Image (cartoon, grey):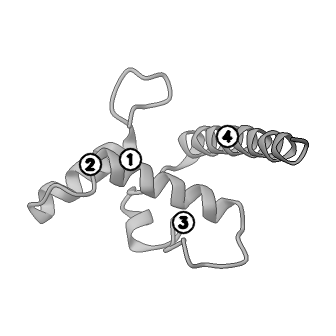
Amino acid sequence: MLNTDGSAPSAMFNASKRTDQALNIIYYAKPEELCARAFEAFVEDEKPQSRFLVKGSRYSDEAKAGLYPQGAQRQQINAAFKAYFSRLGAALYRQQRSSLNQ
């Protein structure tokens, strides 16, 4: 929701706010919608075999309007998701092994 150094709204947030204003709604700039589109971009960048979760975070009209993270912000978000899921996977694996050893 913020730019890379945290000093101002991100380009994605600003584009989302402009889109909401143009459509006279409050949707695209909601935190949960911003996060959902960031996750969608992460999934697409991981090149999934199934396109079920991905609408088009690179070339869709929404992507062209700036409603998905781009550039350095996208890389930073993807790195955060990768770190999170790596740690989650490791914790689940440890829990599973612990349960099997009891």
Q: Which residue is mark 4?
A: 79
Q: Which residue is mark 3?
A: 58
Secondary structure found at label 1: helix
Residue drawn 91% across the image and 42% down it = 101
Residue depth check, mark 3 versus mark 4: number of the one nearer the observer: 4
Q: Are marks 3 and 2 in contact (CB under 8 Å)?
A: no
**The disc labelled 4 sits on which kind of residue?**
Ala
Label 4 CA crowd tier, 10 Å (few <14, some 14–19, many 20+): few
Label 3 CA crowd tier, 10 Å (few <14, some 14–19, many 20+): some
Residue drawn 70% across the image and 38% down it = 83
Which of pointers 3 and 4 lies earlier in the amino acid sequence? 3
Which part of the image, by quadrant, shows the C terminus?
top right
Secondary structure found at label 2: loop
Residue drawn 26% across the image and 48% down it = 30
Which of pointers 2 and 4 lies earlier in the amino acid sequence? 2
**The disc labelled 3 sits on which kind of residue?**
Arg
**The disc labelled 1 sits on which kind of residue?**
Met
Real-space CA distance between mark 3 and mark 4, rounded to the nearest whole angstrom: 17 Å
Label 2 CA crowd tier, 10 Å (few <14, some 14–19, many 20+): some
